[in-house]
Image (spheres, rainbow, N blue to C red):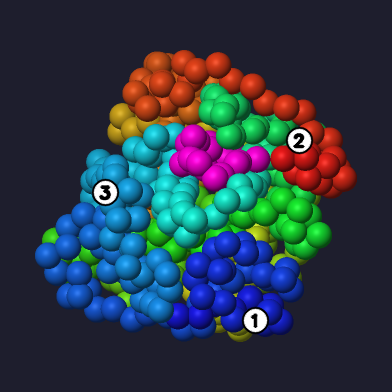
Amino acid sequence: MKYVSSRGSAPALDLSAAIATGLAPDGGLYVPQSLARFDPQDFDDLDTLAEVGALLIAPFCAGDALAGKLTGICSEAFAFPAPLRPLASPRDYLLELFHGPTAAFKDFGARFLAASMRRLRAHETRPLTILVATSGDTGAAVGAAFAGMPGFRVAILYPDGRVSPRQAHQLGCFGRNVRALRVAGSFDDCQRLVKQALGDEALRQQAPLGSANSISLGRLLPQMTYYALSALQHWRNTGDKLHFVVPTGNLGNAVACVLARACGLPIGRIALATNANRVIPDFFAGADYAPQPSVATLANAMDVGAPSNFERLSWLYPDPVQLRREFAATTVDDATIRQTIHDRHHRFGEVLCPHTATAAHLLGRMRAGGDEGSWAIVATAHPAKFEGVVEPLIGAEVPVPASLAELLDRPAHAEPLANDYAALRELLAAE
């Protein structure tokens, strides 16, 4: 399997090279030249994330150095569950993706990427610096996955003051080979700085760099797995396809669901929920795709005004008319997020994080409009990471998962970084 740039002006690479490169030389994102095709029966007798992931991702590793290592990588990456739980309303489900070490869905892809890169660089002598821009959860997942790993350094860029206190603590709690950099700007600024560094060939010769954002195939491909397993479980139990409501900011998690469906998994419709950053809903409502400065919201991990993975979505559906027909997208403001968290708890006993609440609201709207399909709300983070928002709305304390509590008990430190590429370049060159 070869990978090409979404912009079409870069040489085709094997998966390992595409993961190592991160961003294509023409500024595009790497996409597979073709998609694998499966039937649901291909996964008969496969019941775990690791088993499903090894089969699903295998064609994407064909002919690559990672092919013979995939089973071990999946065993490392998918060492915690992603349960599909029925909710109080009939045919409503919650896909819980927050049972990993940092209590967010990003743990799956980050651990897969770390396990892959450790194997690919087993004989390298120069350390590789993993660059990651985060709007809240990605950085902690990457930090946890690479912490203490020989031959790797991590630089996490996050927007100062725009993540929750517990998220900020996580980002700065790893120490050792992981540095947290609080940038005087937005997530879009952090993402821009990371892309500038990855595109700086002179810097990369001086200080080898890699990416761990959702632009990385090493994060995107494994995220197909939990959609595949949950859809297969539902298919086996009911014979019906499972539809998904995905909270999204940078579109990485949503594109993983789209890819899994395109590969033949029994996934039905896909609806996208955003916060007040409405670039994606505006596009699906008929406007041109037009990135905007990001707006700070309660669902901060989705505070993205220039979603990178829109390029991959457009690669899958190059005709904008067809693309708009394929998906529904809705924006959810902070007042509605608060109301949804409050109402879902007091009516059903559910405790949702602000991001998951955007998806729950969208599903509620669809149900009110008469939709009777089987839908899974994708729960992207544990509500305990947003206790300052959630607890006043539900009138109770949210228990902290043991893995999150362990990270919060550590000391944390983050370094200030100017919103200026020269400052980042100087820091990386000195590594």
Circle 3 residue: 84
Q: Is residue 382 above or below residue 68?
A: above
Q: Are marks 2 and 3 in contact (CB under 8 Å)?
A: no
Quadrant of residue 284 within the rendered picture: bottom right
Question: Which tag, 2 or 3, sits closer to the chain's start?
Answer: 3
Q: Nearer the viewer, residue 149 or 258?
A: 149
Q: Amino acid at mark 3?
A: Leu
Q: Which mark is residue 183?
A: 2
Q: Which residue is mark 1?
A: 11
How far across and down, in percent of the image, does residue 220 sit? 48, 60
What is the three-letter code of the residue carrying label 1?
Pro
SS assignment at label 2 = strand
Viewer-side residue, 234 vs 4: 4
Quadrant in which the C terminus is drawn: top right
Residue 142 is inside the magenta segment:
yes
Magenta highlight range: 136-155
| Frontmost residue, 385 versus 358 | 385
Q: Residues within 10 Å of mark 1 (few under 14, many from 20)?
A: few
